[in-house]
Amino acid sequence: MYKSLRQMTITFVSWFDMNVIMATEVGERTKLLLLQNVEQSLRIQTGSIARQALFWILLGKR
């Protein structure tokens, strides 16, 4: 499970980087909407572990 979770995280990080760059160009409001959608889909898939990773990624982007 750890290996598949790690692979999913790597895929998610590269996908998330593209979306953050796009949303930053459009504006903060769009980024907030994007993050809410991402967080909802993550809550369904993996729960709190992936949400923690999401917020760590966000902290790195600011």
Image (cartoon, rainbow, N blue to C red):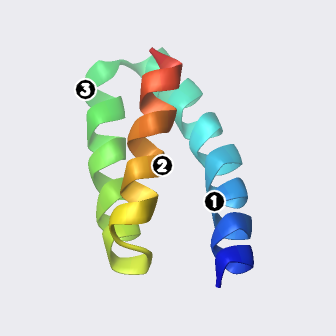
Report the amino acid beneath label 3. Arg
Q: Which mark is residue 29?
A: 3
Q: Which residue is mark 1?
A: 9
As helix, strand or loop, the secondary structure at mark 1 comes to helix
Is 3 left or right of 9, judged from the image as shown? right
- Which residue shows up at 45% across the image and 60% down it? 50
Disc 3 to disc 1, C-alpha distance? 25 Å
Contact between marks 1 and 2 (CB within 8 A): the answer is yes
* Mark 3 or mark 1: whose residue is earlier in sequence: 1
As helix, strand or loop, the secondary structure at mark 3 comes to helix
Task: Give the answer, above or below, for where 48 lies relative to 58.
Answer: below
- Which residue shows up at 57% across the image and 25% down it? 21
Q: Nearer the viewer, mark 3 or mark 2?
A: 2
Q: Which mark is residue 36?
A: none
As helix, strand or loop, the secondary structure at mark 2 comes to helix
Q: Which residue is mark 2?
A: 53
What is the count of numbered marks?
3
Report the amino acid beneath label 2. Ala
Q: Quadrant of the C terminus?
A: top left
* Mark 1 or mark 2: whose residue is earlier in sequence: 1
Disc 3 to disc 2, C-alpha distance? 21 Å
Which image quadrant for residue 18?
Answer: top right
Which image quadrant for residue 34?
Answer: top left
- Which residue shows up at 42% across the image and 21% down it? 26
- Give whichever of 29, 55 is nearer the camera: 55
